[in-house]
Image (cartoon, grey):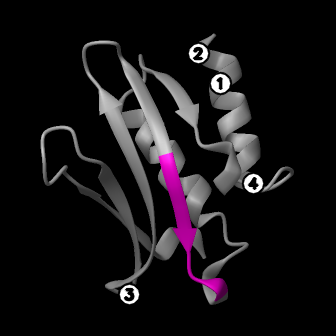
Amino acid sequence: MVADAELVLMPEEHPAGPAAVEIRLGGVIVGDVTFRVCRSCRLAVVEHVRVESPQRRRRLATLAINFLVSRWPDYRGRPMRNFVKAGSDVASTIHSYERDVR
């Protein structure tokens, strides 16, 4: 269930490096979304989405991406489409986010 998920924002280790949102269930990391934010051009790029196989189809990645959008609501978003399967919940979330910021 999504309600038992904890999302933890992990800052960049280096100034230009990627940050991440860890997805945890019961204190155990079951996935993450890696992203970069350019504060000068106000662009957020999702680089990678990972959720462990037993935890897939629970909308956890969608929850993490929505969390990112809520943290930077006035930023444009650019996903790495090769990591997102067309028709998935994550693809739908990214598509609606892109449509809203245009």
x and y percent of residue 66 in the render?
A: 52, 44
Residue 89 got which mark? 4
x and y percent of residue 91 in the render?
A: 74, 46
Q: Report whether 98 appears left or right of 70.
A: right
SS for dot 2: helix
SS for dot 4: helix
Mark pair 4, 3: CA separation: 23 Å
Residue 98 got which mark? 1
Residue type marked 3: Gly
Estimate how packed mark 3 is, as few (under 14), some (14 to 19) or many (20 or more) residues with alpha carbons within 10 Å: few
Mark pair 1, 3: CA separation: 32 Å
Verify CB contact (< 8 Å) between mark 1 and mark 3: no
Quarter of the image where the N terminus is located: bottom right
Verify CB contact (< 8 Å) between mark 2 and mark 1: yes
In this view, which residue lies farthest toward the left?
14
Estimate how packed mark 4 is, as few (under 14), some (14 to 19) or many (20 or more) residues with alpha carbons within 10 Å: some
**Label 3 sits on residue:** 26
Residue 43 got which mark? none
Mark pair 1, 4: CA separation: 14 Å
Residue 39 magenta: no
Q: Earlier in the sequence, mark 1 or mark 3?
A: 3
Residue range (magenta): 47-53
Residue type marked 4: Asp
Mark pair 2, 1: CA separation: 5 Å
Please name whichever residue, 85 or 101, is drawn nearer the observer in this view of the structure: 85
Residue type marked 1: Glu
SS for dot 1: helix
Q: Of discs 1 and 3, which sits in the foreground? A: 1
Estimate how packed mark 1 is, as few (under 14), some (14 to 19) or many (20 or more) residues with alpha carbons within 10 Å: some
In this view, which residue lies farthest toward the right?
87
Please name whichever residue, 43 or 92, is drawn nearer the observer in this view of the structure: 43
